[in-house]
Image (cartoon, rainbow, N blue to C red):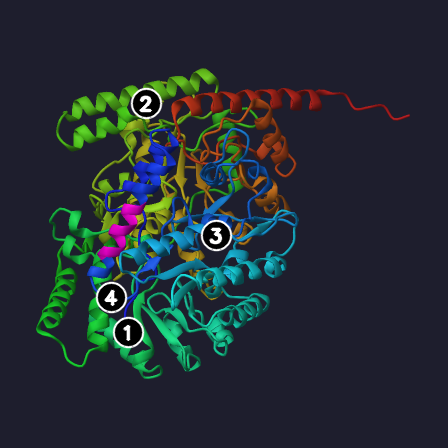
C-alpha cells in the first residue's frame, strides 16, 4: 500500500454534536452505556468512511474518545488514582475520574498546550500499579478493519504522557518512565497480533516546547526501544503546534519509521530536514487549527522545498495537527460571502488529498487544474473584499497608542474600598448562572422569529430579576446579572462587533460533552453601539449592592476565535480593546462601579517557545490595558483567568491594570497560589473554592476548609471568595445549595476571624 496522505486526527463529536447529546443522555440515565457504545460505533464508522471516500490513504483509529484521549491513556496504563479504584464499573469509573461523583473530586483538567481543548491531568504516585488495558485500542482498530479500512493507530506517547502528568509525592514524573515504558512495550506486543503490518502514530507534542536535556534523553531511550519490539509495527512520532528541531536531531538515529512535523506553525522545521535521512516525513502542511482555505500554491511551494532535502517518496502530506480543533464541515453553513473562504475538517481532508495528488503526481489532471484555479479565485476574492478593511479603525488605532489607567494601583484600591464598603472576604460569582432550557428556548424563539424582541427582552429581564433576588437573599456581596442573554462569552460579543462572523454549526470540542462555537474574525473590528449596558443597568436597578459588568477581554476574544491569517494577533487584539474601552466608558456613565474583563484564555495563548513569549506578553498586556484605560480610579476592574499555572507569568499579571484577579484553584488547591505569596503580589485575589465542572455540592465544612487553606497563603484583606468559573453549565438545583454553603462558610470564617483578632493578647509572665 502506497501512503501519500494522512491526517493527524479527526473530530469526535459528530457533524451535529451527536456525541454531546448521547453523553448527556447517558449521564442523566436516559440511555445505557451499551446503547451509547452502539451509537458511538456508528459515528466512528461514518467518520472513517468520510475520510476514506475523500482519498485519504491512512485514516486514524483511537482518535475517538468519550471524554479525552489523555484520560483514555490513563485507563490504558491503569494509572487510576486511589480515590476511584473502588468503583467496579469501568464506565462509571472513567466518567467519575473526569467529572467527579458524590464521594470523589474529579481529576484536574487543564488546557492542551495553547489550544482551547482540555485534557485530564494524570496523577502519579508510588502506589500505582501500572497494568496494560488495551481493550479500547484493539476494539476500535478491529472495527475499522471490518469495514475494509487499515487504519493507523493514534496513541499519546510516553514522553508527553509523563511530561503532562503531575505527581502527588513531588517526584519528577519522568522517574516513572521505568514503570510506564514496559506497559507501552506490552501494548505493542498485543497490537502486533491484529495485522501483518501496523502503523502507529505516537503523539509527542511535548517535544516542541523547549525540551530539556532530560526530556530529550527520555525520548531517545523510548524510541530506541519501542520500534524494536515488533518487526511488523511501524512507529512514527508526531509533533505539532511548533517546530521540533531539537527532537528531530535527537531522534534522527533511532529506528523510528517516521517523524511528523508541523510546517504551518513550525516554520523552523524546514531547517532540520537534513536529519530526516531514511525516515518517512509526515509533512503537516494543511492548517489543523484555523478555518481558512489553504493557499495551495504556498503549500505546494513548501512541499517542493521539503523535497529538496527529503526524497519525494518519503514525504506524506498531512495536517499540521489533529482536526479535533476545527468544526466538522462547511456544508451545513448558510450561503454567504465568507463561506467559500472557510475550510472545516472535511474540507481540509479534501485539501490534503488534493495536495497529495498534485505533489506526488506527474501531471495535473483537468479536475485538479479546476480545483487549483477555484482555490486561487477564493483567495483573491477574500483579499479584495470590501468587508475586510475599515479605514476608520486604522485611523483610530494610530491615535490610540499604548494607554493605561489614571492613578497607581495602591491609590485605586484605597479609593475603591472606601467607595464600595465591602466586608472582609467579599463573596461573588464569576458571571454566568445556569442556562436553563427556558432561556435557551427564548433565544431560539427570537432567532427563529417566533417571538418579538419585546417578548424576548421581558423574558431575559425576568431571569435577571430572579437571579439578582436569589443572590441578594443568600447574602452575596457583589452580584452579577447571570448572563441569560449570552449563549457564549465570546460569541455574544462577536455578534455585536463588526468584523466577526458567526457560524451556524461550527462547533468544536472543549472537553467531554462541552462544545464551543468559536466566532470567525474576518475583518477589522469595531463596536457599532453599546453591548451590555441595557442588561447590567437593569440588574443594578434591582439591588443596592454593586453589580459587576462582565466583558470578555481582547486577548481571550482573539484566543477563542478563529482569527484572520492576514493580520497579526496583536493588531486584532488592539482593535477589540478599543471597542471594549468604549463599552467600559458607557457602563461607568450608567452607574456601574465594578467591571470584570474576563481573560480566561490569557495563559493558553502563550507561545510554546520561550523565545516568543516576551512579544506575546507585550501585546497581550498592552491590549488589556488599552481596553480598561477608560476606567476611572473609583471603578474597580476585575479579571478572571482559569486553568492556569501562574508561576511563570506572575510579573506579567502584575502589569495588567486590574485591582482583582479571580482564578481557578478548587482542584489544585494552594499549589497554584503560593506564587502569589512568594512574589508579594499586590492585587486582590479570588481563588476559586468551588469546582463548577463537577455536579457535586460541597458542604459548608468543605468550603470552610478551602477558605482556611487559602488564608494560609493569601492575606485576609486581599482575598475574595468565589467559585472557580461561571455557573452556566450547572443546574440550579446544584448551584443554589453550593452558593448558599459558600456564603454560610464565609460568614462563619469571618466570625472566627473577628474572635481571633478581638482576643486580647496574652500576658507575659
Residue under pointer 3: 73
Q: Residue at x 66, y 24 (%)?
A: 753
> Residue 470: which disc?
none
Comes first in the chain, label 2 or label 1: 1
Residue located 27% across and 22% down the image? 461
Mark 3 to mark 2 CA distance (whole Å): 43 Å
| Viewer can see residue 289 | no
Of labels 3 and 2, the one closer to you:
3
Q: Nearer the viewer, mark 1 or mark 3?
A: 1
- 487 w.r.t. 366: above or below: above
Please say whether residue 491 is visible from this viewpoint.
yes
Mark 1 crowdedness (10 Å alpha carbons): few <14, some 14-19, many ≥20:
few
Labels 4 and 1: the sequence-earlier one: 1
The secondary element bearing badge 2 is classed as helix
Mark with earlier residue (3, 2): 3
Q: Residue at x 27, y 42 (%)?
A: 17
Q: Residues within 10 Å of mark 2 (few under 14, many from 20)?
A: many
Badge 4 local density, few (<14 within 10 Å), some, or many (20+)? many
Q: Give percent across and percent down for residue 273.
A: 40, 79
Residue of label 4 = 352
* Residue behind mark 1: 2
Query: Which sits earlier in the primary sequence, circle 4 or circle 3?
Result: 3
What whole-number distance in Å separates the C-alpha atoms at marks 4 and 2?
49 Å
Q: Which residues are magenta?
A: 41-50
Q: Residue most toward the top? A: 473
Instruction: Tell me if residue 42 is in the magenta stretch.
Output: yes
Q: CA distance from mark 2 to mark 1?
A: 61 Å
Can you give x and y, in whole percent of width and height, for residue 610 in the image?
49, 63
* Up/down of 367 relative to 13, above or below: below
Identify whether 572 is placed above or below 34: below
Amino acid at each position: 500500500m502506497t501512503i501519500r496522505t494522512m491526517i493527524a486526527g479527526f473530530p469526535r463529536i459528530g457533524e451535529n454534536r451527536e456525541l454531546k447529546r448521547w453523553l448527556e443522555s447517558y449521564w442523566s440515565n436516559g440511555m445505557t452505556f451499551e446503547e451509547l457504545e452502539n451509537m458511538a460505533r456508528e459515528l466512528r464508522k461514518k467518520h472513517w468512511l468520510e475520510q476514506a471516500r475523500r482519498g485519504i490513504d491512512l485514516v486514524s483509529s483511537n482518535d475517538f474518545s468519550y471524554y479525552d484521549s489523555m484520560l483514555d491513556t490513563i485507563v490504558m496504563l491503569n494509572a487510576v488514582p486511589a480515590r476511584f479504584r473502588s468503583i467496579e464499573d469501568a464506565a462509571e469509573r472513567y466518567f467519575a475520574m473526569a467529572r467527579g461523583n458524590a464521594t470523589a473530586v474529579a481529576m484536574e483538567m487543564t488546557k492542551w498546550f495553547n489550544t482551547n481543548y482540555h485534557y485530564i491531568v494524570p496523577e502519579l504516585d508510588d502506589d500505582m500499579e501500572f497494568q496494560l488495558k488495551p481493550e479500547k485500542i484493539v476494539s476500535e482498530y478491529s472495527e475499522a478493519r471490518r469495514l475494509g479500512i487499515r487504519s493507523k493507530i493514534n496513541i499519546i506517547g510516553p514522553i508527553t504522557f509523563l511530561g503532562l502528568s503531575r505527581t502527588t509525592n513531588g517526584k519528577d514524573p519522568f522517574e516513572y518512565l521505568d514503570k510506564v515504558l514496559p506497559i507501552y512495550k506490552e501494548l505493542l506486543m498485543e497490537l502486533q497480533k491484529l495485522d501483518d503490518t501496523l502503523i502507529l502514530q505516537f503523539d509527542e507534542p511535548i517535544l516542541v516546547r523547549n525540551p530539556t536535556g532530560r526530556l530529550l534523553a527520555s525520548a531517545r531511550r523510548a524510541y530506541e526501544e519501542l520500534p524494536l519490539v515488533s518487526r511488523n509495527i511501524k512507529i512514527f512520532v508526531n509533533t505539532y503546534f511548533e517546530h521540533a528541531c531539537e527532537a528531530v536531531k535527537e531522534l534522527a538515529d533511532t529506528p523510528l519509521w517516521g517523524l511528523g512535523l508541523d510546517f504551518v506553525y513550525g516554520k523552523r522545521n524546514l531547517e532540520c530536514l537534513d536529519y530526516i535521512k531514511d525516515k518517512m516525513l509526515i509533512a503537516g502542511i494543511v492548517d489543523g487549527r484555523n478555518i481558512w482555505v489553504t493557499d495551495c500554491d504556498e503549500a505546494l511551494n513548501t512541499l517542493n522545498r521539503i523535497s529538496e532535502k527529503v526524497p519525494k517518496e518519503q514525504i506524506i502530506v498531512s495536517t499540521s495537527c489533529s482536526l479535533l480543533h476545527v468544526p466538522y464541515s462547511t456544508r451545513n453553513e448558510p450561503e454567504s460571502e465568507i463561506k467559500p473562504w472557510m475550510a472545516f475538517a472535511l474540507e481540509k481532508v479534501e485539501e490534503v488529498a488534493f495536495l497529495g495528488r498534485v505533489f506526488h503526481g506527474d501531471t495535473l489532471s483537468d479536475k485538479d487544474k479546476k480545483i487549483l484555479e477555484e482555490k486561487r479565485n477564493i483567495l483573491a476574492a477574500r483579499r479584495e473584499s470590501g468587508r475586510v478593511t475599515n479605514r476608520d479603525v486604522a485611523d483610530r488605532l494610530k491615535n490610540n497608542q499604548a494607554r493605561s489607567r489614571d492613578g497607581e494601583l495602591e491609590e485605586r484600591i484605597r479609593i475603591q474600598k472606601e467607595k464600595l464598603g465591602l466586608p472582609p472576604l467579599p463573596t461573588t460569582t464569576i458571571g454566568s448562572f445556569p442556562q436553563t432550557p427556558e432561556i435557551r428556548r427564548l433565544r431560539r424563539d427570537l432567532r427563529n422569529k417566533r417571538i418579538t424582541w419585546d417578548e424576548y427582552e421581558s423574558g431575559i429581564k425576568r431571569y435577571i430579576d430572579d437571579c439578582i433576588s436569589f443572590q441578594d437573599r443568600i447574602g452575596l456581596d457583589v452580584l452579577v446579572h447571570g448572563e441569560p442573554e449570552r449563549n457564549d462569552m465570546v460569541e455574544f460579543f462577536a455578534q455585536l462587533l463588526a468584523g466577526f462572523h458567526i457560524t451556524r454549526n461550527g462547533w468544536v470540542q472543549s472537553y467531554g460533552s462541552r462544545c464551543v462555537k468559536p466566532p470567525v474574525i474576518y475583518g477589522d473590528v469595531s463596536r457599532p453601539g453599546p453591548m451590555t449596558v441595557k442588561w447590567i443597568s437593569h440588574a443594578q436597578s434591582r439591588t443596592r449592592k454593586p453589580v459587576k459588568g462582565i466583558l470578555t477581554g481582547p486577548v481571550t476574544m482573539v484566543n477563542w476565535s478563529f482569527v484572520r491569517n492576514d493580520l497579526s494577533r496583536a493588531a486584532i487584539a488592539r482593535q477589540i480593546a478599543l471597542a471594549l474601552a468604549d463599552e467600559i466608558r458607557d457602563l461607568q456613565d450608567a452607574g456601574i462601579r465594578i467591571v470584570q474583563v474576563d481573560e480566561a484564555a490569557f495563559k493558553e495563548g502563550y507561545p510554546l517557545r520561550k523565545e516568543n513569549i516576551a512579544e506575546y506578553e507585550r501585546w497581550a498586556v498592552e491590549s488589556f490595558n488599552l481596553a480598561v484605560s477608560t476606567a476611572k480610579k473609583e471603578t474597580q476592574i476585575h479579571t478572571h483567568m482559569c486553568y492556569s499555572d501562574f508561576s511563570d507569568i506572575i510579573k506579567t499579571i502584575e502589569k495588567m491594570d486590574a485591582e482583582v484577579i479571580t482564578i481557578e484553584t478548587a482542584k489544585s488547591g494552594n499549589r497554584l497560589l503560593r506564587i502569589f505569596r512568594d512574589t508579594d503580589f499586590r492585587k486582590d485575589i479570588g481563588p476559586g473554592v468551588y469546582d463548577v465542572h463537577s455536579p457535586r455540592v460541597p458542604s459548608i465544612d468543605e468550603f470552610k476548609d478551602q477558605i482556611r487553606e487559602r488564608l494560609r497563603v493569601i492575606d485576609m484583606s486581599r482575598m475574595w471568595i468565589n467559585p472557580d468559573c461561571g455557573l452556566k453549565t450547572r443546574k440550579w438545583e446544584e448551584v443554589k445549595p453550593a452558593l448558599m454553603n459558600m456564603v454560610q462558610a464565609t460568614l462563619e470564617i469571618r466570625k472566627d476571624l473577628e474572635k481571633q483578632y478581638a482576643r486580647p493578647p496574652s500576658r507575659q509572665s
